[in-house]
Image (cartoon, rainbow, N blue to C red):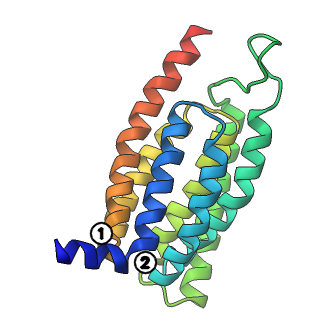
Amino acid sequence: MEGILSWLSTNWIEVSGVIISLIYLYFSVKQIIWLWPFGLLSALFYIWIYFSSGLYADMGLQVYYVGISIYGWYQWTRKETRNSEKPELIVSHIKLNTGIILLLVFLVLWLIISQLLIRFTNSEVPVMDALTTAGGIVATWMLARKILEHWILWIILDAISIGLYIYKGLFATVVLFTVYTLMAIVGYISWRKELHKE
């Protein structure tokens, strides 16, 4: 018991970030707009966590999450609805043109972030850090637009992240990303059912 308390006191920032992130994830799956302020708060915690662990691209991604949380909040209050009484952005499938553009954005970001990490940081995992960061940028933009397929992207990214965080010794975050992976599957099923109701 003493070992657990000692670990918790040493890793309280990471544990707090995990708890806030789980709340964010719950709201995300349930399509509750409060996901955005919890996402912002989670990002603030993880800026420090990733900086301390040398995951600089993931740290930069958290800065992006701060901004996208504001954008997402705005998008989710727009009046594109099934009925005009309830302002809410509706779930949609990705369009082919949007998918091609997002794939290109992902590849360009992955290349640029990888090169920045290789040249200007002491990152031990620059290519994988860049991959999860570029994918996270694209997936979070898709979430802000309520595009169903963002969940598929998260399933892949979260599974990759588990290995990355095991390597870096961020074990509370490994648990978080295991839950993220499972909940992304649940989120996909839940959002898909809603899409088919329309």
> In the rendered view of the protein, which quadrant contains the N terminus?
bottom left
Query: Percent position (x, y) of residue 108?
Result: 65, 62
Count of numbered labels shown in the rendering: 2
Q: Badge 1, how many Cα within 10 Å: few under 14, some, many 20+?
A: some
Amino acid carrying label 2: it is Val
Question: Looking at the rendering, which quadrant does residue 147 occupy?
Answer: top right
> In the rendered view of the protein, which quadrant contains the C terminus?
top right
For image coordinates 52% across by 25% down, the residue present is: 191
Q: Which mark is residue 166?
A: 1
Name the mark nearer the viewer: 1 or 2: 1
Q: Badge 2, how many Cα within 10 Å: few under 14, some, many 20+?
A: some
Q: Which mark is residue 125?
A: 2
64 vs 152, nearest the viewer: 64
Amino acid carrying label 1: it is Ile
Point out the residue furthest to the left here.
1
For image coordinates 55% across by 38% down, the residue present is: 28
144 vs 66, nearest the viewer: 66
Query: Percent position (x, y) of residue 148?
Result: 57, 30
Name the N-terminal-most of marks 1 and 2.
2
Q: Is residue 131 left or right of residue 78?
A: left
